[in-house]
């Protein structure tokens, strides 16, 4: 059952073993390790791409949202201006040692409204 390996077969076995050993070593040297992309970097597939009419509808909806957002920002900044004038008048009426609660309340309203406007401008919502 035991067969002797002749010189030709031994040569091919050695050559094949050397090639198999060299392939992984060469592959590790040739290509640097790549980062595995995070799943959050790629949006999930949303089905087939929308056709042109759907794209137009989506674009029109986005434009309407932007117009509404802009109108809300303008209205809120007008409210901010009115509150700032009110605060200026209340501070002018108060004496230097004491502020009324309405001054503090108006300042808080201005702060909240300014934060809302800032978030709308930043987020686009």
Image (cartoon, rainbow, N blue to C red):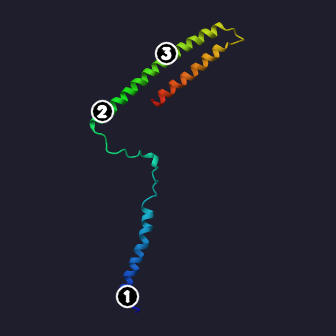
Residue at the right extreme, as displayed: 97
Residue at the spot 41% in from the left edge and 80% down from the top edge: 14
Percent x, y for residue 57? 31, 32
Left or right of residue 35: residue 107: right
Write the residue at 51% across / 28% down: 119
Mark 1 secondary-structure assignment: helix
Q: As drawn, is 57 to the left or to the right of 18?
A: left
Name the image quarter holding residue 101: top right
Q: Nearer the viewer, mark 2 or mark 1?
A: 2
State which quadrant residue 30 falls in: bottom left
Closer to us: 11 or 102: 102
Foreground of the two, 2 or 10: 2
Task: Say what secondary structure mark 3 lies in.
Answer: helix
Quick one: label 2, few (<14), some, or many (20+) residues within 10 Å? few
The residue under the point 46% across, 54% down is 36
**In the rendered image, which residue does mark 3 sit on?**
78
> How would you rate the neighbour count of disc 1 (Cα within 10 Å): few for under 14, some for 14-19, many for 20 or more?
few
58 over 78 or under it: above or below: below
Quadrant in which residue 56 is drawn: top left
Location of mark 2 (residue): 56
């Amino acid at each position: 059952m035991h067969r002797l390996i002749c010189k030709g077969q031994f040569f091919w076995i050695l050559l094949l073993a050397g090639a198999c050993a060299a392939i992984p070593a060469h592959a590790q040297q040739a290509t640097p390790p790549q980062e595995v992309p995070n799943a959050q970097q790629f949006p999930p597939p949303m089905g087939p791409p929308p056709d042109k009419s759907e794209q137009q509808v989506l674009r029109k909806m986005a434009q309407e949202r932007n117009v509404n957002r802009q109108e809300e920002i303008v209205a809120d900044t007008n409210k901010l201006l009115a509150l700032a004038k009110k605060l200026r008048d209340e501070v002018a009426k108060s004496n230097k040692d004491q502020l009324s609660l309405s001054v503090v309340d108006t300042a808080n309203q201005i702060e909240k409204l300014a934060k809302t406007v800032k978030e709308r401008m930043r987020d686009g919502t």
